Image (cartoon, rainbow, N blue to C red):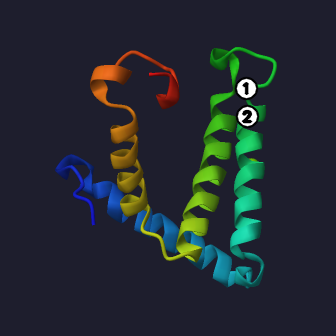
Amino acid sequence: MAQLPHKLGHLVSDIRETTQALLQFRDERDWAQFHNPKDLALALNIETSELLETYLWKSADAANKDEVREELADVFAYAFLLANSYGFDVKEIVLEKIKKNALKYPVEKAKGNPNKYTLL
Ligand SMILES: [Mg+2]
């Protein structure tokens, strides 16, 4: 498992506690039967679209922060549930991806440059 910077360690337990709360909410309603990976991925995509909708036709500053907060919570909820359905450790998969991206986007080439790695 990748090493997490010490100051971020509390996030691991926060993610696990959050996932446990989501699973409890789900199980109290007997919704596990609906939470297959495909439908969780669809729900995640729908919630990201709802997040985008909070910015539609306005500047980022004009978006309603409360709406952004709610839709972002939905995005995290379905992302955590999807990760859980595969037994993925959120910390582990994100840190692995950061390592991969660090190879694709070396600081000396990517610093201050928003281009995709193929254009660096
Ligand atoms: Mg929503």
Residue at the location (66% across, 45% down)? 70
Residue at the location (78% across, 33% down)? 53
Amino acid at circle 2:
Leu
Instruction: Give the label on residue 52, or none.
Output: 2
In the picture as drawn, the residue positioned furthest to the front comes out as 118
Q: Is residue 45 left or right of residue 117?
A: right
In the picture as drawn, the residue positioned furthest to the left comes out as 6
Q: Is residue 12 left or right of residue 39?
A: left
Residue at the location (24% across, 54% down)? 4
Residue 13 image point, x, y percent: 34, 65
Amino acid at circle 1:
Tyr
Please, is residue 77 above or below residue 23 in the view? above
Q: Is residue 45 left or right of residue 79?
A: right
Residue 112 image point, x, y percent: 38, 15
Q: How many marks?
A: 2
Find out if the beta carbon at label 1 lies less than 8 Å from the nearest ligand 1 atom.
no
Residue 35 image point, x, y percent: 72, 75
Separation of disc 2 and disc 1 at Cα? 5 Å
Category of crowding for the residue at label 1, using alpha-carbon neighbours closer than 10 angstroms: few (below 14), some (14–19), many (at least 20): some
Quadrant of the rendered structure where residue 84 is? bottom right
Q: Who is closer to the viewer here, 94 or 109?
A: 109
Q: Say whether marks 2 and 1 touch (CB < 8 Å).
A: yes
Q: Which residue is mark 1?
A: 55
Name the element at disc 2. Answer: helix
Find out if the beta carbon at label 2 lies less than 8 Å from the nearest ligand 1 atom.
no
Category of crowding for the residue at label 2, using alpha-carbon neighbours closer than 10 angstroms: few (below 14), some (14–19), many (at least 20): some
Instruction: Give the label on residue 5, or none.
Output: none
